[in-house]
Image (cartoon, rainbow, N blue to C red):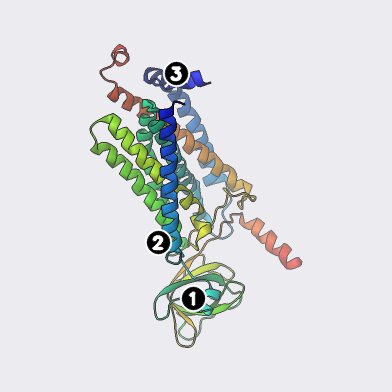
Amino acid sequence: MTPARKKRLGLILLMVAGVAVGVGLVLKSLDQNIMFFFTPSEVMSGKAPQNKLFRMGGMVVEGSVDRPGDGLTVEFDLTDNEQRVTVRYAGILPDLFREGQGIIANGKLNDSGEFVAEEVLAKHDETYMPPELAGMQSKQESAQ
Amino acid sequence: MFLWFHKLGSPPHFYRIAGKWIPWLTWIFLAFLLTGLYGGLIEAPPDYQQGESYRIIFVHVPSAWMSLLIYVVMAFCGAIVIIWRMKLAEVVLISSAPIGASFTFLALVTGSLWGKPMWGTYWVWDARLTSELILLFLYLGIIGLHNAIDDRRVAGRAVAILALVGVVNIPIIHYSVEWWHSLHQGPTVTKFDKPSIHWSMLLPLLLMAMAFQVYYVLTLFQKCRVELLRRERNSKWVEEL
């Protein structure tokens, strides 16, 4: 490489490194804003905003889904395997909503520590398999 | 090897070689596309959670991969443009931009259509979706900047710098689902662990990814040939065609 080309290569590397560091610092300072949701543990330890809408994500606890009263309201517990928070929601649930599945609820905490959701989104995981195989797996798990 | 590379860099030579490859690439593309579509839409079983609607991944995931890959190719060309002032790299860079923008758009639209029934929403501002949208704006910015400058050589250098600056977004898109809590799921195939997708679905997915890659090279060659003719319309080799 000629000296002029070496210099230009150096400048490019410097530029990309500079931009990367800059963007990295911005993202670091925006960390909490980029987080799409809080986990139940974070909510219980008071990290989530009070009296403001925020999102909470976790697994729907097996056997916790209940429809009290009018049949429209749904109640279920969300967990991150450490803490549990009860969620109350009146509305249409997405297709993928089921017990043991990850979901994200948008809403706020009420005075009794329940999370009143205005919107419930299902969080799909990255596993894809045929239904027969999934059936076999759950049978194996229950046999163990 | 270097000599071959050097020769390929000359416009008339590239024009001829690309022209020879185009019919072959068309057949290879069609072969991958048809086997991939047949495998994905007919042979592959439904998903245990999502049923039939997961099949959009056979378009969505390859498009998203291509949107990243094409940008990396463009940034690489950008470095060559700045360091070696190579004309062909400018042509490849700017010819890739509309193709990359289309794949990004396709990834966003297919993801959004899938998101409504599965997540319950067309769009959320989570890290993955937002960074992919920024990628679309980067592509559009590169196209716009190139059109705004009349002198082709100056335009080539300007978009090279923009392409290089934007490359920091690529790792952000890829790792967005791991660095932050997001609604979008984590990587299924592109991780060090075993892919968490059954092989009967993985195989058509990879075939579709191959089809999209060949399609990119195919359209890139066609666009590059046009761009070369436009730039070199006054030179001797174009007159001799």
Relative side of B189 to B4, left or right: right
What subunit carries mark 3? B
Q: Secondary structure at mark 2?
A: loop
Distance from Cα at disc 2 to Cα at disc 1: 21 Å
Residue B131 position by quadrant: bottom left
Residue B141 image offset from top left, x and y in percent: 31, 44
Q: Amino acid at mark 1?
A: Lys
Q: Where residue B19 sits: x, y (%)?
A: 41, 21
In the picture, the disc for residue B212 is none
Secondary element at image label 1? loop
- Report whether A18 appears left or right of B47: left
User: What chain does mark 2 sit on?
Assistant: B
Residue in the image at 47% along x and 52% along y:
B172
Badge 3: residue crowd in 10 Å (few <14, some 14–19, many ≥20): few
> In the image as oriented, which residue stretches furthest toward the top?
B240
Q: Identify the residue at image location x=44%, y=52%.
A: A21
Work out whether residue A86 can be spotted: yes
Q: Which residue is mark 2?
A: B125
Q: Which residue is mark 3?
A: B7
Farthest residue to the right: give it: A144
Q: x%, y% of residue A125?
A: 55, 60
Residue type, numbered disc 2: Trp
Residue corresponding to mark 1: A47
How far, Cα to Cα, is label 1 from label 3?
61 Å
- The amino acid at mark 3 is Lys
Q: Earlier in the sequence, mark 3 or mark 2?
A: 3
Picture coordinates of residue B225, whole percent (x, y): 35, 25
Q: Image height check: is B111 above or below B162?
A: below
The alpha-carbon separation of the residues under discs 3 and 2 comes to 47 Å
Chain of the residue on which disc 1 is drawn: A
